[in-house]
Image (cartoon, rainbow, N blue to C red):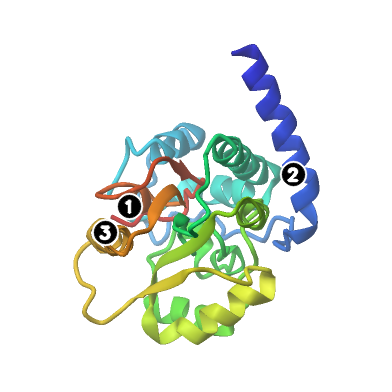
Amino acid sequence: MTFILFFLLISTAAIAAKASHVDSIPNQIHPLRPKTGSGGRHVPQINCLSWRLAVETNNIHDWKLVPLQCEGYVGHYMLGKQYRDDCYNVVAAAIQYAKTLKIAKDGKDVWVFDIDETTLSNLPYYARSDVAFGAIKFNGTKFDEWTREGKAPAVPGALFLYRTLLAMGIKPVFITGTKEEFRQIRIANLKKVGYHSWIKLILKGVNDTGSSVTYKSGKRAELMKAGYRIVGNIGDQWSDLLGDFVGLRTFKLPDPMYYIS
């Protein structure tokens, strides 16, 4: 057990060193909205670190907003070193697992990637004062405008995982809740930051209804029916990793900014 822990720590440090040159999220704290109580809104006392732990372990679910008093905490976490370290630890564990697999030569072994907060980061958007790291109600129109800009950087460590899996012969599949109308924008954004190839890029069509769990389960079922083997699955939301046909192993990246059911 001690050896495994030591190996993971060494692997994480190595991955962080190799991947640091592809992380383009500004490592700085943006000005945060003053804590005025939002027009008299009651702000209950809460331990923000404990809240984040409960969120990441899915003990708190179906939540709508980051607690007002945790806006600053979430902002500092997401833009600071700890978020990057946490991502690298997940990536190190995923790569260590992938090395245990016996990859077939038929090109049917695939790894499912989510996009938002998994391969591409929306931190530049969530750091804006009118979004406040998820402490203000989600505005779909404004988020679509941000998506159209096609400027999302790579999530820390995710590009290194992607490249490592490709080198091992594991093919990437992207399954995202992004609307189909943004296909060309998303393709350009992915390629711009280094994701250059994939087996499938599955976006949400107008006929894809129901919860995210239902939608992604259905798309994974289609992959399996087509003969693909899902050897791994990584996402930032529990809805990426729950449901049917999730794969042989799942990995969750941290995301305390929003919850998708």
Q: Earlier in the sequence, mark 3 or mark 2?
A: 2
Q: Which residue is mark 1?
A: 239
Is any atom of residue 96 visible in this view? yes
Tell me how far mark 3 sits from mark 1, CA to CA: 15 Å
- Identified by mark 2, the residue type is Ala
Q: Quadrant of the N terminus?
A: top right
SS at badge 2: helix
Q: Is residue 215 above or below residue 254?
A: below
Q: Earlier in the sequence, mark 1 or mark 2?
A: 2
- Identified by mark 3, the residue type is Ala
Horizontally, residue 12 falls left or right of residue 242, namely right
Residue at 46% of width from left, 31% of height from top?
50
Q: Which residue is mark 2?
A: 16
Q: How many marks?
A: 3
The nearer-to-camera label among 3 and 2 is 3
SS at badge 1: helix
Q: Nearer the viewer, residue 15 or 75?
A: 15
SS at badge 3: helix
Q: Are marks 3 and 1 in contact (CB under 8 Å)?
A: no
Q: Which residue is mark 3?
A: 221
